[in-house]
Image: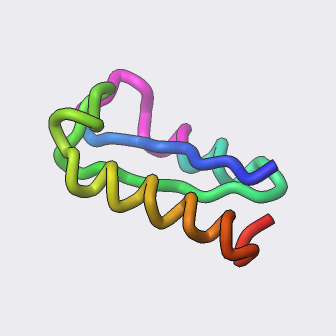
Amino acid sequence: MPTLAIGARYDTMEPAQMEKIAKSVKVGRYLFCPNGSHLSIYDDQKVYMAGIISFIRSVDSGEIH
């Protein structure tokens, strides 16, 4: 199952741990939001949405599966 783990600079969840999660699953990808918090969808919206869209397109195209 393709998995996207998202980390953000100002999140209480450590970005390094989120990256580790992405690497620990068989088909994982990591997205870092440099200006985001736990609510990166609001405070780092451009990076967050571009990352989500890229991930979905990669899954849909079969690039990652």
Which of 9 and 29 lies nearest the eye of the viewer?
29
How many numbered circles does the render carry? Answer: 0
Q: Is residue 61 above or below residue 60?
A: below
**Where does the C terminus fall, quadrant-wise?**
bottom right
**Residue extending furthest top?**
12
Q: Residue at x 43, y 26 (%)?
A: 13
Q: Residue at x 68, y 64 (%)?
A: 59
- Tell me residue 6's x, y (percent): 47, 43
Q: Of residues 11 and 43, which is closer to you in this image?
A: 43
Relative to 62, 57 lies left or right: left
In reply to whether residue 49 is colored magenta, the answer given is: no
Q: Which residues are magenta?
A: 10-18
Task: State the image coordinates of residue 20 (x, y, percent, origin top left).
Answer: 62, 47
Dividing the picture into quadrants, the one containing residue 14 is: top left
Which image quadrant for residue 62?
bottom right
User: Residue 50 lies in what quarter of the image?
Assistant: bottom left
Q: Is residue 52 left or right of residue 3?
A: left
Residue in the picture at 61% in, 58% down:
29
